[in-house]
Image (cartoon, rainbow, N blue to C red):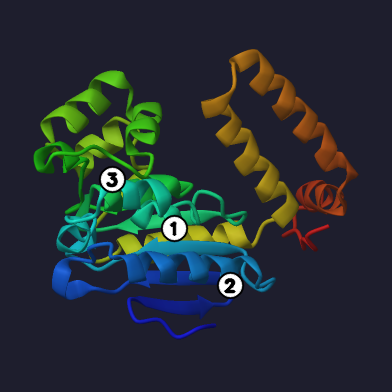
Amino acid sequence: MSEFEHLLVEHHDAVALIRLNRPEVLNALCLKLMQELALAFEQIEADDKIAAIVLTGNDKAFAAGADIPEMKDNSYQYMLEDGGLTRHCDAIAQCNKPVIAAVAGYALGGGCELAMMCDFIIAADNARFGQPEITIGTLPGFGGSQRLTGLVGKSKAMDMCLTGRMMKADEAERCGLVSRVEALDSYLDVAMTAATTIAGYSRPVVSKARQAVDLALETPLSQGIKSERAMFKSTFALDDQKEGMAAFAEKREPQFKNQ
């Protein structure tokens, strides 16, 4: 694993913990951090020992947004040709391993967008979510308007994107942006436990389950059901399906072999 300037990466058995580490600027997303994040995900993807990932920041901020002083003078031509931060922002969304965001404090702008790229979000009770780009003369650029609308609906997404207001953790849970809200002193442990649980299941089946849920956001219901049914049937070609159902019938823990 590479050494990083703005990330801390730990391996806990089959779970990788990636911590954004620019605490002096509330983990603002600079170009170097985004480059490192893409590289870290690439390396973890290639590591067969890792089956799940937790992405987090610190208790004050997951990430408070893009590093505005770094990007404020970018030209339109530069953004068209290079993309800036957006060139590195898809590493999480395209990851083939399950990713949980463990969010405390501020998750604003690009930080909120990074969290939404993960499979689900476990939030601390002090978490604050927002897309405040409108307040600095721009709009979300990491997919925020699209993912947020899919998660919370048009009205909430319009409210957040047009007013720039922050959403507290309890509201984020009510409207479906986050899956759980936990105490600040336990949210990361809960996320790590969830990742460890996922890592213990059959990896081919976890992959199919992720695909099935993602399809629901991207296809009509009738097509989604057909695809889900095909994936369900395909699990019966796996040794892990035989082992899982045999273990249930025999009242024992399954021993999955990821095949």
Q: Nearer the viewer, residue 106 or 93?
A: 93
Residue 203 position within the rendered picture, expressed as x and y whole percent measured from the top left = 70, 56
Q: Look at mark 3 in the image and give the residue it sits on.
A: 76
Bin the neighbour count of mark 3 within 10 Å (Cα to Cα): few under 14, some 14-19, many 20 and up. Answer: few
Task: Characterize the local packing of mark 2: few (<14), some (14-19) or many (20 or more) Cα atoms within 10 angstroms.
Answer: few
- Where disc 3 sits, the SS reads helix
The residue under label 2 is: 43
Q: What residue does disc 1 label?
A: 88
Q: Residue 78 at x, y = what percent? A: 33, 53
Q: Secondary structure at mark 2?
A: helix
Q: Give the Cα distance between marks 2 and 1.
A: 15 Å
Describe residue 167's horizontal placement relative to residue 193 as left or right.
Answer: left
How far apart are labels 2 and 3 at the CA level? 32 Å
For the point 75% across and 58% down, which residue is it? 254
- Residue at image coords 45%, 63%: 54
User: Residue 35, percent across and down?
Assistant: 42, 67
Asked if residue 202 shows in the view, the reply is no
Nearer the camera: disc 2 or disc 1 = 1
